[in-house]
Every structure is written in C-alpha cells, then in structure tokens.
Amino acid sequence: MTDEMYCDPDDNAIDLVEIEFQDGTLYFKDHLESDDFRKLEGPKNAILRNLNNQVLMKKSGMDIAVLEDMTDCEIQANAPQTTFIMQAYKETVPNGLAIAILVRSKNQIYSLSCQNKELQFKEGAAPNHIASTTSDFIFYQKKVIGHEKMQFESSLYPGYFLACEKEQQGYFKLVLKEGCEEADKFMMFIVQYC
C-alpha cells in the first residue's frame, strides 16, 4: 500500500447473489442489499495538499477549509485542524472509494458536507449508515490517471469535485467545482496518510 492510496479490494467488491429460475421467473435466493453506504472499520488520518503543496486546514471557529503554505512544524502545531479523518464506506453501487472527510477541532468532530453545491463543515460525525446512493457527506476518492494524485467527486452532485479556489483576500479556499475532460490541477490533491 502506498502513502497516497487507501483502497481495500474487498471493500469495493460486488457481492453476488444466488438465483434460480422457476416456471420462467427469476428468483433471488438470498436477501438483496438496498442501495446504500455502510461505514467500514478503521478510518485513516491524512494530510491533504494541493499541487502547490499548500495544506488543507479547517479554519478555527468557521465552517470552511482553506489551503495555506505550512512547514511540517506548522502542520503539527495546527493539528488536529490539519489532520483529516478519511472514513471509508462500503457501497452497493460501486463508483470509486466512497469516503467521508472529517476533522477534529476543539474536542468536536466536524464532517465535510456539500449542499446546494456549497461546502461546509457540519458538527458531528458522519452517519454509520446512509440509506441512499447519494449523500452530502460522501465523496468518491479517485486516482487521477497519469498522476500520483487524487480527486474527490461529490456523490450528491456527480461531475462536481473538491477544488481549491483563490479568494479576493489572497487565500485559497476549498470549494466544489464542476469538472471537465482534462485534468484540472485545482481539483487534484496529494493524500499523505499518517
């Protein structure tokens, strides 16, 4: 397993179900799973960086994330707001590695959410079970072909990805951005598991 990739083939497998034909009708012998997401054991901690090597950080007292230039000492000094919890989910409709992105700040857990195509951190952990094929908490972690980088696509808004965007104040903010055919460097991230 590399430092940049977290994927267990068993977690992304499709479960096959026994079937039988009776009088021209197809019957399933086992219970069918509903289309949903179920939390897997063992979340992974990670530092997320953009291609400019800026570190993703939840702003204290705010529900946004920004990307800042930081040394390793500054990353540690700003922990846990620079250490993100990558919680994997097993899904019944495979579309990549389904994850929720969480962060701890002042003894509280916050989950990254996208609603109305806007990102914000919501207080509380992501749910153990999501009875749907989409969720504002779930992003698909996908390896960028030809790069050792990752993209995170929203399950709620297919074709929209986490991206960094420069604000008028000069800092980079984490946003949800519609993707395009070519690889957009603002939608690529380095995932460093720790």
Image (spheres, rainbow, N blue to C red):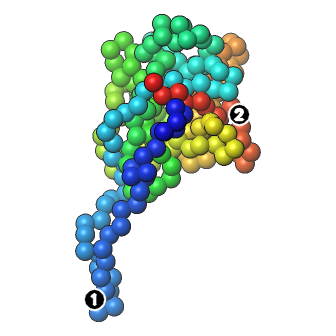
Compared across the picture, whether 163 is left or right of 35 comes to right
| Amino acid type shown at disc 1 | Gln
Considering only vertical position in the picture, is 62 above or below 180? above
Residue that carries the numbered disc 2 in the rendered image: 185
> Toward which corner of the image does residue 164 lie, by quadrant?
top right
Q: Are marks 1 and 2 in contact (CB under 8 Å)?
A: no
Compared across the picture, whether 101 is left or right of 147 comes to left
What is the crowding at mark 1: few (fewer than 14 residues within 10 Å), some, or many (at least 20)?
Answer: few
Query: In front: 99, or 160?
Result: 99
How far from the left and from the top, in percent, is residue 168? 71, 16
Residue at (48% x, 28% y) in the render: 193
Residue at (63% x, 13% y) in the render: 69
Residue at (64% x, 43% y) in the render: 144
Numbered circles on residues, count: 2
Residue at (59% x, 24% y) in the render: 49
Q: In terms of secondary structure, where does tag 1 sit?
A: strand
Picture disc at residue 77: none
Considering only vertical position in the picture, is 111 above or below 75? below
Residue 181 seen in the current view: yes
How far from the left and from the top, in percent, is residue 148? 63, 37
| Amino acid type shown at disc 2 | Lys
What is the crowding at mark 2: few (fewer than 14 residues within 10 Å), some, or many (at least 20)?
Answer: some
Residue that carries the numbered disc 1 in the rendered image: 22
Considering only vertical position in the picture, is 109 above or below 156? above
> Toward which corner of the image does residue 27 lie, by quadrant?
bottom left
Considering only vertical position in the picture, is 185 above or below 35? above
Along the polypeptide, which appears first: circle 1 or circle 2? 1
Query: In front: 132, or 71?
Result: 71
